[in-house]
Image (tube, coloured by chain):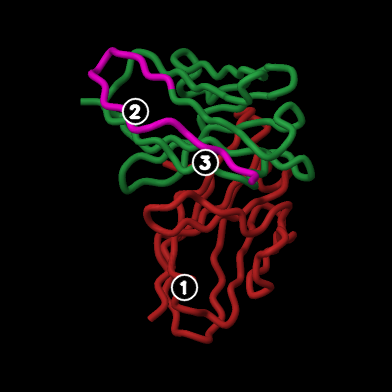
Chain colours: A green, B red
Amino acid sequence: QVQLVQSGAEVKKPGASVTVSCKASGYDFTLYALHWVRQAPGQGLEWVGWISAGSGSAKYSQRIQDRVKITRDISATTTYMELTNLRSEDTAVYYCARESVAAAATCDLWGQGTRVSVS
Amino acid sequence: QSVLTQPPSVSAAPRQTVTLSCSGSSSNVGSNGVNWYQQVPGEAPKLLIYYDDLRPSGVSDRFSGSKSGTSASLAISGLQSEDEADYYCAAWDDSLNGQVFGGGTKLSVL
């Protein structure tokens, strides 16, 4: 079954770091890129960053590029998003989403979301 | 403040057709494909339209997309109660070098 399964909810204190994982299954992991998108409570979607699962190269939102790092483990078919120096405004549901091979910057498969609370 | 502009809410009666708008600029909507996502509260977004007007397999043909210049639209025909959701437009932004979203439109089916 083609799916993305994310790690569980996290509660962190301001200044701490959090790592959210996203395990892919059912497709060739290295052929796709993976995006991370977050959604604060009651708010819209915000792009966090992107990684090429094949090359490992990543790109980040200018807004948080100094605090976020996205990596991947090919053997585990898992992508990781680390956010450091957490602030209350980082409280959000974090989604990983696969980029379509047919359409750049198009997310055709989404994880279930991981709630990160900073308090 | 979202880079792409969408009306916060739209409402329409069942079986009607509604059009959702998305306004951007030359660095995003004007130069790259626009995607539309549907999000039911409590669930992950779902891709509805990509590259302005293409439908992924399995998406109803009641959903259609279009674009003109720096504005894009999503039309939903034959509205059903199950269409009640938040709808987001998105595009790559060449200036920001990242993906940008609209603030979302909440669709209510009266």
Label ID, residue A50: none
Camera-nearest residue between A65 and B3:
A65
| Label 2 – label 3 distance at C-alpha | 19 Å
Residue that label 3 marks: A111
- Amino acid type of the residue tagged 1 in the rendering: Glu
Secondary structure category for the residue under label 1: helix
| Label 2 – label 1 distance at C-alpha | 31 Å
**In the image: residue A113, left or right of residue A12:** right
Crowd tier of the residue under label 3, counting other residues whose Cα lies within 10 Å: few below 14, some 14–19, many 20 or above: many
- Marks 2 and 3: same chain? yes
**In the image: residue A107, left or right of residue A9:** right
* Outermost right residue: A102
Crowd tier of the residue under label 1, counting other residues whose Cα lies within 10 Å: few below 14, some 14–19, many 20 or above: few
**Where is residue A92, by image quadrant?**
top left
Question: Which label's residue is closer to the chain start, 2 or 3?
Answer: 2
- Amino acid type of the residue tagged 2 in the rendering: Asp
Residue that label 1 marks: B82
Q: Chain of mark 3?
A: A
Camera-nearest residue between B77 and B43:
B43
Q: Chain of mark 2?
A: A
| Magenta highlight on residue B10 | no
- Amino acid type of the residue tagged 3 in the rendering: Gly
Residue that label 2 marks: A90
Give the mark toward the camera: 3 or 1.
3
Secondary structure category for the residue under label 3: loop
